[in-house]
Image (cartoon, rainbow, N blue to C red):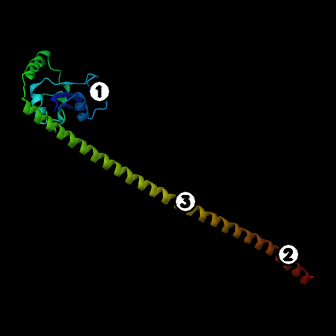
Amino acid sequence: MARKLKVYQTSQGFYDLAVAAPSMKAALEAWGAGSNLFHQGFAKESDDSKVIAAAMDQPGVVLHRPVGSDAPFREHADLPTAVSLDARPRKAKARAAKSKAGRTLTTDKKSERRAAAAFEKERARREKQRQKEEAAAAKDRARRKAAREAAEAASERETQEHEEKAAQIEKDLEAVQRRAEAEDERWKKAKHRLDAAVRKASS
């Protein structure tokens, strides 16, 4: 049997959030919350008739409005203004009035079933979107990993080639140095012999 939906509210960043869900756990999943906001006092079941009506009109869809404002909840909302950010909490009397109005909102069994089905449809869409995003992220990670490995392999090849060429150049330099030393030694001997011949011819 489909579970009756309730409307839950919280605030995240620049927005107040609302969602029609069958449980607090389902609401937390819809919000993508990493902790239990209800236990922490940051989320609650809504008693505002306008909020309930808006959320029940789009079960499972996370609705937004600028944080601290009285703007209607929408799937896509504008950023808050300085006025809404500085707005004081509503008075208890106003909250009580809205609470009373919220309790008068009723739905029949058929509407409840339709809302529950709509919630499941939205949950499935959100899960499919999450899986799609995770697959795209995994594909991107694999692409970046392959590019990094290719770059590292190219760097290793170039490094090895450089080291081999540098070693060959070092060997060539050593050979040239040996030839230079041999030529110097040969010249010293030849010069000594030539000088002796010149002295002998001059005496």
Residue mark closest to the camera, 2 vs 1: 1
Distance, label 3 to label 1, CA atoms, is 53 Å
Q: Residue furthest bottom?
A: 201
Amino acid at pointer 2 = His
Using the image, tell me which numbered label, if any, was put on residue 36.
Answer: 1
Q: Is residue 17 above or below residue 155?
A: above
**Quarter of the figure that contains the N terminus:** top left
Q: Residue furthest front?
A: 1
**Quarter of the figure that contains the C terminus:** bottom right
Residue indicated by mark 3: 159
Residue at horizontal 10%, vertical 18%?
94
Residue at horizontal 54%, vertical 59%?
159
| Marked residue nearer the N-terminal end (3 or 2) | 3
Residue indicated by mark 2: 192
Q: Secondary structure at mark 1?
A: loop
| Marked residue nearer the N-terminal end (3 or 1) | 1
Q: Secondary structure at mark 2?
A: helix
Q: Residues within 10 Å of mark 2 (few under 14, many from 20)?
A: few
User: Does the CB distance between marks 3 and 2 fall below 8 Å?
Assistant: no
Amino acid at pointer 3 = Thr
Residue 166: name its quadrant. bottom right
Q: Secondary structure at mark 3?
A: helix
Inspect this view and state whether residue 116 appears.
Answer: yes
Q: Is residue 177 above or below residue 117?
A: below
